[in-house]
């Protein structure tokens, strides 16, 4: 079991990881490919103390190098759900589960907002993992919405189980999907139903009668993967120790609120890691 | 009038200053000589993201260089009192006063604790500035406690005004003071009196009957220089915007509480500066 799992590999996540290591904790970082797209794109950064006038991409590389020097290489496996189990967390990946005693969420902002109805129907028709939930849809009708080609694997798995599969790729390219899959050049707009999901409404106005809708997203908003996490103004609510309302769960960086700034994220990542370490030590 | 005055030139103070500049604010930094003695002494720092395994002194120099590149050179003039004036602050230096619309305190920890009785008698016998308050002690008896040779200037000024002057230097060296000054090889232990200061009790047990006691310290605890500042566990109480209980007054770094760490200080300095900038912009 991990001591600390970090979701997100931007400045807050990497800072949390190196500080967890400095306290001798077993840590693993899960994040999307670029780790920090904002840093990658930044032309020049002047307000991170110690690096006057540095290019964002150079700083991003230095951050990753620093982490690597301490043995931390972020995994790009997406976490599709988090279950607080009392004294540890169960993290649902697409192919496996991982256990961690504490969790630090540093997923940033700018992740696509959930669709109307999406959060309401999680577990009642909405899923983020075909490997995990596909079997519930044997002989049924499902739609798959994906922001990257990795979604095609999910579609093809579902094509073997479900009666009918629609695919809505939100990216450009060749789609390598089973012949039985119907590819739609449309976008999802809304999820509707009564006690369970019944319809996926598309931008064009067309409605698909579905039993399930699978979303494949590179990174999921924390609010969607952790049930019961308290928010404040759409950000994760934290105290000065970066603790959330769930014991053992901490957050840092943009996901906790403004200002959306580098030094704040790095500082909060440090505080979150040291708080998690203290939490662990108190329970030993 | 300054937009932002920063007291303290450690990582939090310099980070606040460069971020104030990034928002186009007129800023001045006041700090003690080394700016960050802890950083100066640190053999190796591994948990400030971007600088794996750097020597503390090298990082301290880089921080000062970064500030200098943005035109920020910390002043070593000590601030002996701060008066909140409603919509600005009056900062008392030894020889002059400075006005600032907002104030950020980043004075760190590890500053000598006040003596028993010291805070109680501020303005009623205890002073931190002979130039400012010396005239109140014409013909009276005063003691001067100093942690550096700069205190000798204060003693000599008081020797011209007071009837009797005791000097308690807390440093080693040659003491260049007027002949009338009595130098004591002893240490202050406690200040006592009823409505005003009446006695300075020394470590040896000896008691001096004094009307005034002047302290010359390189840096004063914020709690002693700002009347009415709210504390929590001996640290300045701040919210997530690094705002204190006094409007326009912010704090960052170790002075706001644990963990006493570099990245936390840098991040909080940034947040404090951006909060001060927002406070200023809202009042324009």
Image (spheres, coloured by chain):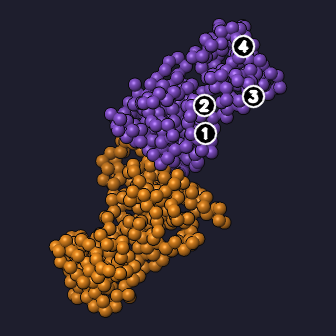
Chain colours: A purple, B orange
**Label for residue A224?**
2
The residue that disc 3 covers is A190
Residue A144 seen in the figure: no
The residue that disc 1 covers is A109
Q: CA distance from mark 3 to mark 2?
A: 16 Å
Q: How far from the left and from the top, in percent, is residue A186? A: 78, 23
Figure quadrant of residue B183: bottom left
The residue that disc 4 covers is A141
Figure quadrant of residue B210: bottom left
Q: Residue at x 57, y 17 (%)?
A: A132
Q: CA distance from mark 1 to mark 2?
A: 13 Å
Q: Sequence-wise, which precedes: disc 3 or disc 2?
A: 3
Task: Give the structural element (helix, strand or loop) at label 2.
Answer: helix
Which is nearer the eye, B122 or A151?
B122
Task: Give the structural element (helix, strand or loop) at label 3.
Answer: strand
Q: Are marks 3 and 2 in contact (CB under 8 Å)?
A: no
Q: How far from the left and from the top, in percent, is residue B57? A: 34, 52
Task: Give the structural element (helix, strand or loop) at label 4.
Answer: strand
Q: Is residue A123 left or right of residue B107?
A: right
**Vertical placement of residue B232 versus A65, above or below:** below
Q: How far from the left and from the top, in percent, is residue B173? A: 21, 72
Q: Are marks 3 and 1 on the same chain?
A: yes
Figure quadrant of residue B144: bottom left
Q: Is residue A92 left or right of residue A160?
A: left
Q: CA distance from mark 3 to mark 1?
A: 22 Å
**Vertical placement of residue B144 versus A218, above or below:** below
Q: How far from the left and from the top, in percent, is residue B63? A: 43, 54
Q: Are marks 1 and 2 in contact (CB under 8 Å)?
A: no
Q: Are marks 3 and 1 in contact (CB under 8 Å)?
A: no
Query: Which image quadrant: the C terminus of chain B?
Result: bottom right
Q: CA distance from mark 4 to mark 3?
A: 17 Å
């Amino acid at each position: 079991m991990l001591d600390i799992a970090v979701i997100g590999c931007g400045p807050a996540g990497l800072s949390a990881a190196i500080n967890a290591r400095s306290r001798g904790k077993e840590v693993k970082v899960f994040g999307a490919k670029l780790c920090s797209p904002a840093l990658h794109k930044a032309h020049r950064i002047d307000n991170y103390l110690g690096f006057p006038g540095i290019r964002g991409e150079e700083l991003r590389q230095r951050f990753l190098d620093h982490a690597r020097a301490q043995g931390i290489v972020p995994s790009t496996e997406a976490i599709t759900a988090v279950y607080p189990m009392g004294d540890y967390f169960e993290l649902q990946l697409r192919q496996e589960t991982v256990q961690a005693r504490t969790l630090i969420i540093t997923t940033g902002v700018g992740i696509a907002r959930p669709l109307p109805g999406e959060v309401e129907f999680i577990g009642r028709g909405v899923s983020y993992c075909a490997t995990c939930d596909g079997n519930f849809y044997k002989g049924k009708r499902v739609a798959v919405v994906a922001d990257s080609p990795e979604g095609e694997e999910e579609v093809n798995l579902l094509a073997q189980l479900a009666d009918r599969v629609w695919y809505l790729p939100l990216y450009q390219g060749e789609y390598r999907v089973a012949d039985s899959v119907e590819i739609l050049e449309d976008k999802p707009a809304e999820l509707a139903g009564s006690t369970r999901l019944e319809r996926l409404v598309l931008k064009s106005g067309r409605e698909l009668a579905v039993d399930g809708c699978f979303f494949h997203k590179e990174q999921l908003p924390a609010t969607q993967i952790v049930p019961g996490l308290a928010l404040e103004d759409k950000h994760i609510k934290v105290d000065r120790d970066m603790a959330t309302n769930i014991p053992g769960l901490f957050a840092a960086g943009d996901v906790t609120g403004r200002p959306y700034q580098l030094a704040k994220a790095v500082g909060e990542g440090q505080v979150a890691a040291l708080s998690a370490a203290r939490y662990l030590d108190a329970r030993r």
